[in-house]
Image (spheres, grey):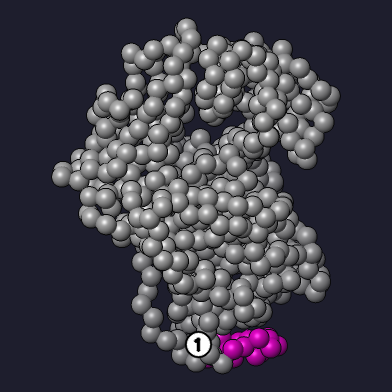
Amino acid sequence: MQYTPTVGRRTVLGASVATTALAALGSSAISEAAAAPARSITPRDSNLPLRGWSSWSLCATTYPGTNPDGRASWLTEANVLAQAEAMAGRLRAHGYEYINIDGGWGSADIDDYGRPKPNMAKFPRGMKAVADDIHAMGLKFGMYYTVGMQPPSYNNGNTPILGAPGQFTRDIVFPDLRKTGGWLAHYAIDFSKPAAQAYIDSLATQFADWGVDFLKLDGVGPGYAAPITGYDNRDDVAAWREALDRTGRDIKLQVSWSLSHDYVDFWREHATSWRIDFDVEPKFPTLVTWDLFVKTRWWDLPQWSEDSRLGHYNDLDALNVGNGEMDGISEDERRSYMTLWAIAGAPLYLGDDLTKLDSFGEKLITNDELLAINDAGRPAVPLDQHTEQPVWFLRLPSNDVVIAMFNLADSPKDVTITFRDVGINGSVRLWDVWAQHSLGARTVGSFSTSIPPHGCRLLRATPLGSRQTRTAVPTRLRATAVDATSINLAWDRVFIPAGSSYDVRVNGQVVVTTTDRSAHIVDLTPGTAPTIEVRAKNGGQTSGWSSAIEIVTTSVGGPTRYEAEHALLTAPAKVADSPLCSNGKKVGYLGKSGTATFEVEVPVAGVHLLTISYIVGTPSRQAFITVNSEPPFLANFAGTSDGLWVTPQLLTIPVALTAGSNVIKFNHPSDGVPDLDFIAI
């Protein structure tokens, strides 16, 4: 869908000011290192992923003693400045620089122009003083706000708008006083009204005057928080971006939370980062739990994995890997958590209590080689997301390839990576990033390792040999559609200069040369399985051929469709009306005891392309697919994250079938699976 917008300063003193303020507030968490004047540290490029700390994990948890007076009671001036002291003394040298105050800082009071005031019981000196102390430590200051107009600001419509003489809050809201935002708690602003931008400008000016360097704008839709009303806050986001730019201050903008991927181009145009998922904190007696919201990132991220650009990033939410027992996860889980965030090129903002870092956690968050990978601006992608042992990889500007091997299963698993699959042609030298030691040269073309439950291995592979053999091989060659005489192909781009081209060969013969990352192969024989490969070319350099795929063409015409409502179902799975689905029907309530089993016919044995039309309203869902008597395999289904469960999407997966009748079953032993529209072979 096309979108069209409607559209008295305090002296900054040395770090000792923060120490004095903390002492006056009764803080006992003052580090000598942070109390000293800040060391001269080269500033990070402002376009790199944000690195710092955010308050919400500590505000949300019910960990004993953390929030004694209810949620967010932890959030005080003294506690925030203690985190800043710890960061300045121990983490700033590793690029951590933002101290971000999340929700819970405001009061019900507003100023004369409907702008919020801080809770003076929590922040007795006000936000400008806190920001000044943070800046004096060589750090940056972040704040939190929500979309729409807060009810106290509305004030029965009688609040004047700064910068818009004669205009009041009643002039910029909708006549029906509709609500917006993730909690439907604020009045929606009508941005077709001229004074609407002036109101957002006044808020942005206030934040800039306080010294804000980063703003998290929460409750934004379209996304999972807007399933029924379908509210759309893109006008809010555009207005905030314009307002922040008008302040003349470099203020980064994050939009949150669990946003719809359908609008990723808009989020990237207006925001520095965008939350792709739910809060990582389950609001339990620990900061996080593995199964609820940490593990889900491996499934929810793939559809976004190629959307990051320099200066604009997928946000996976806070990192809680530094406090040990308080984190609530094992050391293997903490390492995997840190690894995925870093290789994804995501902002790295810690949610832990920085005054209580354990030695393991501090080593995780200060591994400078890993942090350099995070800064590379090349987010990792999964080699295959349809497995509990996913391998993610990225190619660095140096031509080295970073390979992260994960085990999401609850038991140890052996994992093997073939170097050609991640773009390496020939022998390599391996380095273990976490263990910080060499694994030597490898000439056999693969590497195998045993990985504990929820653990990982992180390798850096340096291609060896001649310049020709070091040229990157195209990766993730896949079929996206097939019929009797043609196959559609796609593959990943290779980081070589513009003007590069790709050769596609079928059964040993080059049939297509293209500058795109896709091709349409024609004149194939029905019911056959051609061997297909691709290579990259640039000037005098030519890569090796990619790993080959073999997909059986249909025997005649196009794929055969099997409607889900005609599958064999076990309760509680049932047929439901769904107007956007084929025949207006879908099957829901699948998972656990609810299964759907299809019987399909193919005349030729081999690897066939299974196309699944499905509906998922969350960021993702998974299903185990059983083909005949083979062990079930996990399939990951990207979701719309709109909460509506009405829009069909397509997923294609290669599956090995026998000639004649085959049985394909969808289930999950412990969770819900996607609603099904149809499958096609």
Q: Position of residue 331 (x, y in %)?
A: 66, 67
Q: In this view, does 162 lie to the left or right of 59?
A: left
Q: Which residue is drawn at 64% across and 48% down?
A: 296
Q: Position of residue 100 (x, y in %)?
A: 56, 67
Q: Which residue is drawn at 42% across and 86% down?
A: 39
- Any part of residue 443 in sight: yes
Label 1: few (<14), some (14–19) or many (≥20) C-alpha neighbours in 10 Å? many
Q: Position of residue 603 (x, y in %)?
A: 55, 11
Question: Which region of the structure is painted magenta?
Answer: 14-31
In which image quadrant can residue 23 be found? Answer: bottom right
- Any part of residue 645 in sight: no
Q: Residue at x 36, y 39 (%)?
A: 546
Residue sitting nearer the eye, 455 or 420: 420
Q: In this view, does 166 lie to the left or right of 333?
A: left
Judged from this view, the residue extending furthest toward the front is 444
Name the residue tied to disc 1.
15
Judged from this view, the residue extending furthest toward the left is 540
